[in-house]
Structures are given as structure tokens and as C-alpha cells.
Amino acid sequence: MSDTAVPVQLKAKDFKSDQEVRWCPGCGDYAILAAVQSFLPELGIPKENICFVSGIGCSSRFPYYLTTYGMHSIHGRAPAIATGLATSRQDLSVWVVTGDGDALSIGGNHLIHALRRNVNLKILLFNNRIYGLTKGQYSPTSEVGKVTKSTPMGSLDYPFNPLSLALGAEATFVARTIDSDRKHLTEVLRAAASHEGSALVEIYQNCNIFNDGAFDLLKDADSRDDEVIRLVDGEPIVFGAEGQHAVVRNAHGGLKIVPTASVDASEIVVHDAHSSDTATAFALTRLSDPETLHHTPIGVLRHVERPSYDRLMGDQMSAAQSNGPGNLQSLLTGSDTWTIT
């Protein structure tokens, strides 16, 4: 949109479609949908300038329930399709909705290259650690030993850590939030929307049919204060109901958790989401136990600036056009072609 465009005054109801929402009762997707519908008016963008592209899976029904443009696309290919849209229509706000199975299995290659290129996409990765739409098979984020219909003796696969993967791909915005924490979810969405380039937001989302309670440790009032590490840029990383736990560096340059009272305040790591070095952000993603999710960081882990792929491509196209019209016939029959006799 033009910088001089007048913001559009919309409300949450303006983004609710007339389609029946068809998820299982109690599914975490309802909470995410409600948060997104309530957040979108903040963008001040006309509905026709917003597009949601999804892949395949329960989460990928998302575009039906919004009054923006949208596409329910192909399994794992949403980032590729959204890349084409974002690079050809830089006036649009393009969002990708995907799941842990859709994005990290068949779609893994598309996801990491969209992040590497820094395409101007906001990618919402719903992680329920299971395949829901196909009825409860283990997914790329399921814990080792997970007993499902496809792994009756327990999964042998070590799970992906989506945020570690994103940081390894040099993503410029990486964050995690939880479906049931409406305030935190909205704050993270707001930060992602303000970012130019690829933004990956992993959302822990409960599948109450095939993997119910997978995130109870992080949600229950009796445990969440001691298990959830809430990251705030510029603040020391302490957590617990009384701030009794702290994150410090270990002897090998990584991070560890210690009692706050056992260290000097200067030893406590201060969160810096804007650091160009991914080492600390990556170490934060490794704090949580992949089996139990014990000590899980949430919030924005990385938020750095780098020119977006769309903008760089647009600059190249403008430069090419300024050199005058091209000659297609010359291109087709130029020196890099041969005649076979």
C-alpha cells in the first residue's frame, strides 16, 4: 500500500466469514482464529490487500474463516505459493498458515528456503505434535517413543525443534507463543506483522482428540510459572512465580538454568532479540526438554533487519527496465543456444 493511504477502520467482525467453522469442539485452532480476527483490524489494511495461504491439515482450513483473500493450497507448498504472491504483489500483506506435519515433513524444504530468502511472509506454524487431519499419526515434532497408529511400538524419530531450524536457516524473525494465552499470542502477532521479511511464529496448539494435554505443563496454573520462560527484549531472563529461576551461561558457552539467588545479577543473561549473532537465540531454543517441554521459552527470540527478497527482486526488475526494453528473440537465439544436426 502507499505510505499516504488512509488507514481502514475495521473491526474483528469484519474479518469473520459466513462459513461454518469445522474443527473439533475444544480444538486450539478456535482460539488462534479468534485472536487473528481480533488482531487484523490493527493493520489498517483493506481486506482485499490481505491474503492467507495454507497447505493441508486441520490448521489449513483457516482461509475459509476469514473474509480476506485466501488459498487452501497443496500439502507442504504454502510457502512456495505465498512466495510467488508476495514477490509479484508487494502491496499485499501475505500470511501462511501451516502445521507441524505440513511445514516440517513434505514442506520442510519450502519452509527453510522461504526463511533463508527472507521473503516478506508471516508464517504461523500451528504445532500440536501430531497429525490431526489424518487421524493421529506421529509428526515431525512428536517426542521419541510416541505411540500412535503409525508407531504402535513408539516413534524412533528425534523431533524437529522448529525454532532451532528457523534460526539455522537465518530467519530474521523467530517467535513462539501458546494458543491459550490470548494476550501473549496477540503481542507476538503484532511484532511479526511489523517485521519486513520472513517471520516464523510457532504456536503451541492443543489437539484435544489425538494429542490432548500435550502442553498442559506450560498451561496449568500449578506448573506454568516454573516451566515457561517469558522472553522480554532488554530484560534479564528470570522466571518462576517469585523470579527464583535465572538463565546464565555455562562453561561451554551455552545456557543453563540456576537458582536466581545463587548468582550475581550481572551473570544473568539479558535477552537481546535484535542481536545479529544467532548463538544465544539458538541456545535458548535448546533449553527446553524435547520430550517433556520442561523449561520452554516463549516470546520473540530473534528480530533483526535484512532487506527482504521481494524488495531486492523489485530493485533488480526496476534496474533492468531502466536499461530499456528487452529483446525476447535475441534471448532465445543468443550465443547460449546451439543447432543440433
Image: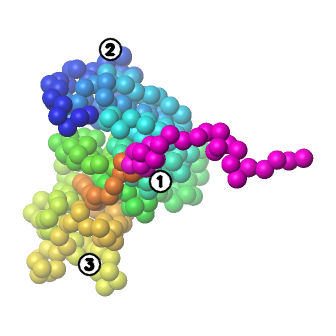
Q: Which residue is mark 2?
A: 18
Q: Position of residue 242 (x, y in %)?
A: 9, 63
Q: Is residue 195 visible?
A: yes
Magenta region, residue range: 313-341
Question: Which is more N-terminal, label 2 or label 1?
Answer: 2
Contact? badges 1 and 2 (CB < 8 Å): no
Q: Residue at x 36, y 16 (%)?
A: 19
Q: Callout 3, which amino acid?
A: Arg
Q: Position of residue 187 (x, y in %)?
A: 19, 45
Contact? badges 2 and 3 (CB < 8 Å): no
Q: Which residue is mark 1?
A: 112
Q: Where does the N terminus fall, quadrant-wise?
A: top left
Q: Nearer the viewer, mark 2 or mark 3?
A: 2
Cα distance in 3D space between marks 2 and 3: 52 Å
Pick out the residue farthest to the top.
18
Pick out the residue farthest to the front.
324
SS class of the residue under badge 3? strand
Decide: few, some or many residues near mark 1? Use Cα within 10 Å; few <14, some 14-19, many ≥20: many
Q: Residue at x 23, y 46 (%)?
A: 194
Q: Residue at x 43, y 37 (%)?
A: 88
Q: Which residue is mark 3?
A: 249
Q: Position of residue 72 (x, y in %)?
A: 47, 28
Magenta-colored stretch includes residue 322:
yes
Q: Nearer the viewer, mark 3 or mark 1?
A: 1
SS class of the residue under badge 1? helix
